[in-house]
Image: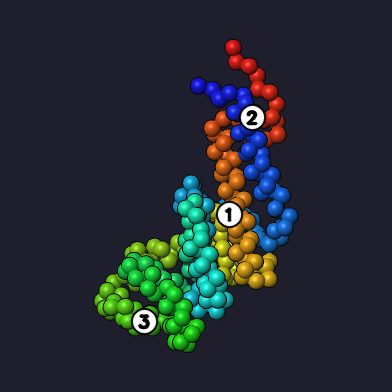
Amino acid sequence: MQLSFRKAFWITITSLFLLSTSYAEEDAFAGKYDLITTPQPTNNSEKIEVVELFWYNCPHCYQFEQLLGPWLKKQPKDVEVIFMPAIFNESWGILAKAYYTAEVLGILDKTHDALFEAIHVKRQKIKTEQDIQNFFAGYGITPEEFHNVYNGFSVDTKTRRAKLMTRKYGVTGVPALIVNGKYRVSGSHVTSYGEMVEVVNHLIQKERAQMKAAQLKDSTGTPMTHDSLSTPSTTH
C-alpha cells in the first residue's frame, strides 16, 4: 500500500532537516579532516565504523588512548570501533603482530593497555619477537603457544591486511582515525587530541544523518532532495 501524501511529505521534510543540520555544522569542521581518495568498505554497512590506527611505541598514541577509552564507553550501538596497528616498516610490523597474537590468544583485553604502559611508563624495551614472548609469559602464555600463534596463518593474514589498509587509508602518522572508510582524522589538522575526538563525533553525526536520510528514501521510494517537495503525480 502506498504511503499517503501527507506522510510522505513529512518524511521528506524530516530527511531534509537531518541533512541540513549536518551541512550547517560542516563549516566549523572544514579543513580539520581529509577525504580518503578511494573510500574503503566497512565491516558492517548498518553501523558507523571508526578505525583507530596506532603504534605501541608511539608516545602520542599512548596519550591518546587515555582520552579514547572513556569516549569509547559512551558510543551508542550504531558505532563500531576497531583498533588496527599501523604498519610502515618491519619494526612496526613486529608490534602489530603482538596486537594480533594477543587477539588470537584471547588476552587482548589484558595486554593492550598493559603493553602501552610497559613501554611508556615502565620504560621497558619491547621491540623484538623475544621481547614480546617474554611480555606474554606474564599472562600465562608458554613459549610454544606464543610461537605457534605469532608465526601462524591468522596473525600473518591480519598483519598483512593492516599493512595494506594503512596504505589504502592514506595514513602517514599515528594516531589516526578513519570514519566509515571515508574520512581521515589525524593530528595534521587539529590542535589537540580533544579536537580530534570532536571532529570524529561530527563525522559520526554526519554519517548517521546520511544513513537515516537513505533509510527514509527507501521507505518512500522518493529521493530526498528539495524537488521531493513538489506534489507527486496522482495514480488512478
Of callouts 2 and 1, the N-terminal one? 2
Q: Residues within 10 Å of mark 3 (few under 14, many from 20)?
A: some
Q: Amino acid at mark 2?
A: Phe
The picture quadrant where one finds residue 179 is: bottom right
| Viewer-side residue, 194 vs 160 | 194
Q: CA distance from mark 2 to mark 3?
A: 62 Å
| Viewer-side residue, 167 vs 15 | 15
Q: Amino acid at mark 1?
A: Ile
Q: Position of residue 98 (x, y in %)?
A: 40, 73
Q: CA distance from mark 3 to mark 1?
A: 36 Å
Q: Position of residue 233 (x, y in %)?
A: 65, 19
Task: Name the residue beneath numbered marker 2.
Answer: 9
The picture quadrant where one finds residue 101 is: bottom left
| Viewer-side residue, 45 vs 231 | 231
SS for tag 1? helix
Q: Is residue 46 visible?
A: yes
Q: Amino acid at mark 3?
A: Phe
- Disc assigned to residue 204: 1
Task: Name the residue beneath numbered marker 3.
Answer: 135
Closer to the eye: label 2 or 3: 2
SS for tag 3? helix
Q: Residue at x 32, y 69 (%)?
A: 105
Q: CA distance from mark 2 to mark 1?
A: 27 Å
